[in-house]
Image (cartoon, helix red, strand yellow):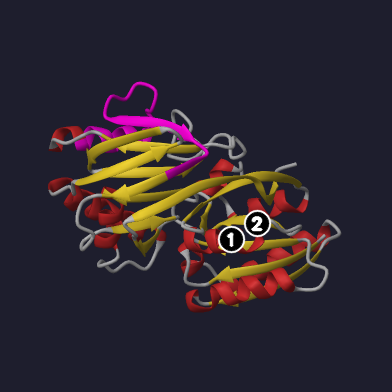
Amino acid sequence: MHFSTVLNRDGGTLRTTDIEQFSTRLCQTLEGRGHSCTVAIVGAGDIEWALKAAAAEDGVDVVMAGGGDGTVSAAAGILRGTERALAVLPAGTMNLFARSLGIPLDLDAAVGVFASGRIRQVDTASANGQPFVHQFSIGMHAKMVRLRERLDFASRLGKIGASAKAAYWTVLKPPRMRVALKMGETEILATTSNIGVTNNLFGEGHLPYADHPDGGMLGIYVTVARQRGEIVRHALNVAIGRWQDNDLVEIHQADRVTLRILSPLRSQMAVIDGELQPVAAATEISIEPASLRVLVPG
């Protein structure tokens, strides 16, 4: 197979990696298994252009995307519905979609897996037409990301530290909003501090990622925690993957949901696969089963 690789030098662990040496090892590993390889190293501002160029390259079978959540999400949006496969190089902070696909978190180990991997079809989702592979959320998560982005960090560990500070500040003053959720004939009105809509349900007993990325259903998580102590307990439950025995969140499934924000929008933002985005008064979210070809361990 021919691999066209795009590495975001500003993303995750690649910030502190000798990216030229890694690129050489990457191609040596793939070529040693009979594949061909090209590598483009770009900054965050050029990542979407580079991914589109990689997908359009003559004879390309696999686009390997290395960077954070935004890089992987952009690649999935470009490749979904095509015959090109996506190889997710886990160079971000949490690498949740890579975990969902069973990709090793060590970069060189991941490349070795890709060299002998197989193609699998998984789901993507979209919010008002914007694709995502992990999660759309509003409320506490968005506030935490917004606060984190105000802090300086230059490494993966620095980002984790900044996230911890932002989470602490968010718990001290959590947002509250009124929302309406419509799923088929069912409509739910709620006052909540957070709504998360995920590309398939999160698995139990681990970080928040899907065990079955081809399940064909959105996970809809409505946080009912209100008091500070409840919110702290809810955050801990999310971190360890306690969903089945968790009275601080309501969980629903649907293939399509309409989310309407009934509170004023002036301070609201959404997070889509880790990236802050403006939020609309109404958001149509749907899942697209088997819409993305991915390379996974053989």
Any magenta on residue 247? yes
The residue located at (25%, 37%) in the rendering is 190
The residue located at (57%, 51%) in the rendering is 106
Q: Which residues are magenta?
A: 231-257
- Kind of residue at badge 2: Arg
Q: Are the residues tagged 2 and 1 within 8 Å (C-beta)? A: yes
- Kind of residue at badge 1: Gly
Observer able to see residue 152: yes
Find the residue positioned furthest to the front: 185
Disc 1: CA contacts within 10 A as few (<14), some (14-19) or many (>=20): some
The residue located at (77%, 60%) in the rendering is 30
Label 2: state its secondary structure. Answer: loop
The disc label shown at residue 295, or none:
none
- Residue 64 lies left or right of residue 207; in this view the side is right
What percent of the width, then of the height, locates residue 112? Answer: 71, 52
In the depicted view, which residue is nearer to us: 44 or 123?
123
Any magenta on residue 80? no
Disc 2: CA contacts within 10 A as few (<14), some (14-19) or many (>=20): many
What percent of the width, then of the height, locates residue 205? Answer: 44, 29
Location of the N terminus by quadrant is: bottom right
Image-quadrant location for residue 217: top right
The disc label shown at residue 80, or none:
2
From the viewer's perspective, is residue 214 above or below residue 141?
A: above
The residue located at (18%, 32%) in the rendering is 230
From the viewer's perspective, is residue 45 above or below residue 34?
A: below
The disc label shown at residue 77, or none:
1
